Amino acid sequence: MIVSTTNTIEERPIRADKGIVTGEAILGTNIFRDLIADIRDIVGGRSASYESVLREARETALAQLQDEARRVGANAVIGVDTDYENISTGSSGSMLMVLASGTAVLVA
């Protein structure tokens, strides 16, 4: 499966447009990650635990996107966009939502 952020694939003409496909992933973080992230926010630096959750969510959303494209008979997804959102669940922590969307196509 070809997945591209561009609207064309070089030397692979689009034979059929199969429509918009999406993949979603919502993963919970936890209070300890939130606490460490709050500290990192104050002192600076990267949060490896959040980066790991973010990577997992993105990979899950893109895998779902590809699965949906296969179901509609596509062999590529073009114009892929990913959106990220942090959803607060109150004092218990937060959840990370990643949405991937694109156009499923059949290319030569």
Image (cartoon, grey):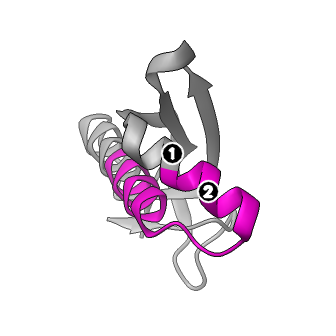
Q: Residue tagged by mark 1?
A: 35
Between the C-alphas of marks 1 and 2, the distance is 6 Å
**Callout 1: helix, strand or loop?**
helix
From the viewer's perspective, is 54 left or right of 4?
A: left
- The foreground one among 91 and 61 is 91
Q: Residues within 10 Å of mark 2 (few under 14, many from 20)?
A: few
Taking the image as shown, residue 15 lies to the left or right of residue 52, namely right
- The quarter of the image holding the C terminus is bottom left
At label 1, counting other C-alpha atoms closer than 10 Å, the crowd grade (few under 14, some 14-19, many 20 or more) is few
The quadrant in which the N terminus is found is: bottom left
Q: Residue at point 48% right, 27% down? A: 93
Residue 39 numbered tag: 2
Q: Is residue 29 visible?
A: no
Left or right: where 24 falls relative to 81? left
6 shown above or below 16: below
Q: Are marks 1 and 2 in contact (CB under 8 Å)?
A: yes
Residue drawn 46% across and 55% down? 54
Q: Position of residue 90 (x, y in %)?
A: 56, 14
Q: Magenta region, mostly helix, strand or loop?
A: helix
> Quadrant of the rendered structure where residue 28 is?
top left
